[in-house]
Image (cartoon, rainbow, N blue to C red):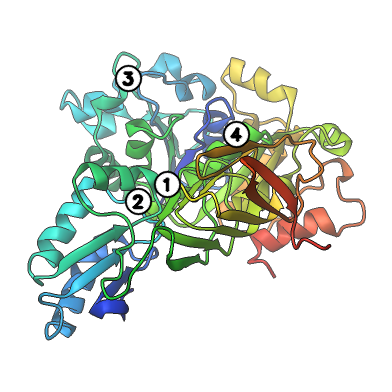
Amino acid sequence: MIKLKGMYDSMVRCIISEELEAGDFSKEFSDIREKSQQFLPGAKVVLDFGGRGLSEEIVCRILSEFVWPSMIHVAAWITYDAASQDMLKRSGLPTSEPMPDTRVVEKGNMGALLLHRSLRSGQRVDHYGDVIIAGHVNDGAEVLSAGHVIVLGRLCGLVHAGCEGDENTSVVARSMEAMQVRIGSRIGSLDRGAIWWGKMVIVKVSEGSVLIDYWPVIK
Amino acid sequence: MASRIIVVTSGKGGVGKTTTTANLAVALASMGNRVVAIDGDIGLRNLDVIMGLENRIVYTLIDALEGICRLNQTLIRDKRIENLYMIPTAQSKTKDAVTSEQMKGICEDLRNDFDYILVDSPAGIEAGFRNAAAGADEALVVTTPEVSAVRDGDRIIGLLESMDKSPIRLIVNRIRPQMVKKGDMLSVSDVLDVLAIDLIGMVPDDESVVTSSNKGEPLTLSTDSPASRAFKNIASRIAGNDVPFQDLDGLDSNGKGFLGKIKRAFFGRC
């Protein structure tokens, strides 16, 4: 229920399954610590909780029962629950995917994040590169990406591509059902009656305006 | 039989959580189960009125937590049905009067004495909801076929998932088949498409619900209205019985798309 996976730059991703009950955290983290005691001390670890919400109590427990005893450096606390992200940020804990050290990374040029899930209302993805959602972005969910955003399902929530200011980014949605799309510092609005509504589209900035077109564009 | 603690919640207010709790409590007790319905809406209690037990309240949940009485002194037995009880909450307190740990403790204390413990949650996503859901194993999310209610339902489902509640099942309340036919109301299929959880029942809009709430006589006590039948069916599905879904006024005349989708959702998307 808790898996460790290697990442770039000797970093380790610790994936905590959403199905794992919070009551079983202590045992599972203890097992992982025991099995991985040879390489965990000093390792940079991304704690990935998926869509799970984190309370202050759970964060304290993970710190005292896993982070401190195993001597790891936590590079990021990843959760798609917006309220938990805010709580972690308030506590001074990193919530964005860490940047690789060994290659030059420009803004918005980090590895893509592929998410095999739908985002529910109140959930948020905040990534420093491109984002691909293999699911729906429901009304009330948010995707903030420094790069491009591709939604393979319905896009009903808020997407902000190029949120670091890059207006050369775009948004692709299989079914466009969002009233607003943001790219860089531009905001595009859409009405339910628009011809694009419910269609597969690409949204981008051209000559300072947010433009929407069918996707793929057939000339 | 192992006791089951079920929170009835929605996110949006006014979609029928309390009515659902009362009717399901009555229906489950009528099937021979020992049932207690807890009013988790501190400060805005209504379950007592809808169940017609408001004149029997002596002690409340908060009194038990403050040590003024024992927990079993707060239990009000419904004289109309054997094995049906209710625990009222205080009207003069706020949601902060109880903690999640206290709610968990209350639910666990009741677990040995009841087959079903239904907790009526307040609207919203703040402490009141979290406390009501804290002690529950599973959840029933009530929504109406309105965009705002569905969006709030989606939010609540995300929170329930992060709280490890399972299963989380959906009740679509106040369906008006004629409006659905005309395209003026979301269909159950539309709602399921967004919320993507298993459907456990759909309740048609029924005037008798208003009458029964005002009289303090849950529909499932006696009447045979469409809403009453729907609530009884939901209770039966909660108990694990295989009950076919009602065809609400022939919404799916060819027996395929609409009901087929619901059956797939309920029976494991087969």
Which-is-in-front pick, marks 2 and 3?
2
Discs 4 and 1 carry the same chain letter: yes
Amino acid found under the numbered disc labelled 4: Ala
- The answer to whether dots 3 and 4 both sit on one chain is yes
Position of residue A179 measured from the top left corner of the image (x, y, whole percent)? 65, 37
Q: Are marks 4 and 2 on the same chain?
A: no
Going from N to C along the chain, the mark reached first, 3 or 1, is 3
Q: Position of residue B161 (x, y in %)?
A: 43, 53
Q: Are marks 1 and 2 on the same chain?
A: no
Whether residue B116 appears in this view of the structure is no
Please tell me whether residue A13 is drawn above or below residue A75 in the rendered image: below
Measure how far apart labels 1 and 2 are at the Cα level: 7 Å
Residue identified by numbered label 2: A53
Q: Which residue position is annotated with label 3?
A: B90
The residue lying at 52 percent from left, 35 percent from top is B21
Q: Is residue A152 left or right of residue B224?
A: left
Tell me the distance, in whole angstroms, between the alpha carbons under discs 3 and 1. 26 Å
Asked whether, in this view, residue B215 is left or right of residue B138, the answer is: right
